[in-house]
Amino acid sequence: MRTKKNNYEDFIKEDAEEMSYYDKLTLITIKSEGGKSRATRIQKLGLIINAIKEGKTPSSHGPYFYGGFSDDIEESLNYLLESGMIKIENGEYALTEYGRKILEYLEKKLDDDYKKLKEIVEDITPPLKKLNDRDLVTLTYLLFPELAKNSLIKEEIEKILESGKFKSFKIYIEDVKKK
């Protein structure tokens, strides 16, 4: 007879092993933000992380009203909500205890997707945590101008970019890409 603990561990294993790359990306991105993050930050961090992993502008992101947007990340947010790995708390996506357990399982298992994501996230997120949402959006416009063509805030962001404030971040990200 199975114990309650074994059933819970079985659920964790099953859910973790069924996760898509984007589910893992989204979950680890929320974790990197201290366990809570808004959709905009998740989208923009996911864009930067994917670009570093792929070495180019990721095909998973397309131009949208506020720059690069991924339907895959949006779908993952919905899946993670439905599965109980995250919840909405004060307008932010927040890890649940179950989501933390899934991450612990992935950490122990260290599958290839998770391992590569973890390396990139640990390299890239410390300086990006210092940026507010608007600055993070601005950085993605600098790095991926082709994704800003449909933007409703393009002119506003271009004024910020003209100030030169983000050139050091672009250099830092280029260095991380080389690793």
Image (spheres, helix red, strand yellow):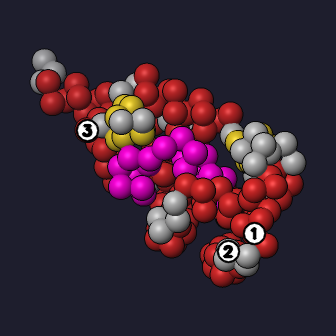
Judging by the rendered image, the residue that carries numbered circle 1 is 161
Q: Residue at x 13, y 18 (%)?
A: 1
Comparing 34 with 22, the one in front is 34
Query: Can the viewer see residue 34?
Result: yes
Judging by the rendered image, the residue that carries numbered circle 2 is 166
Residue at disc 3, secondary structure: helix
Write the start and end of the magenta stretch as one range: 30-49
Question: Residues under labels 2 and 3: Cα distance?
Answer: 36 Å
Q: Residue at x 68, y 61 (%)?
A: 138
Query: Disc number at residue 97?
Result: 3
- Give the residue type at disc 3: Glu
Left or right, 115 with respect to 106, comes to: right
Residue 23 position within the rendered picture, expressed as x and y whole percent measured from the top left: 52, 39
Which of discs 2 and 3 lies nearer the camera? The answer is 2
Residue 88 position within the rendered picture, expressed as x and y whole percent measured from the top left: 39, 32
Question: Residues under labels 1 and 2: Cα distance?
Answer: 7 Å
| Circle 3 residues within 10 Å: few <14, some 14–19, many ≥20 | few
Query: Can the viewer see residue 61?
Result: no
Q: Residue at x 39, y 52 (%)?
A: 31
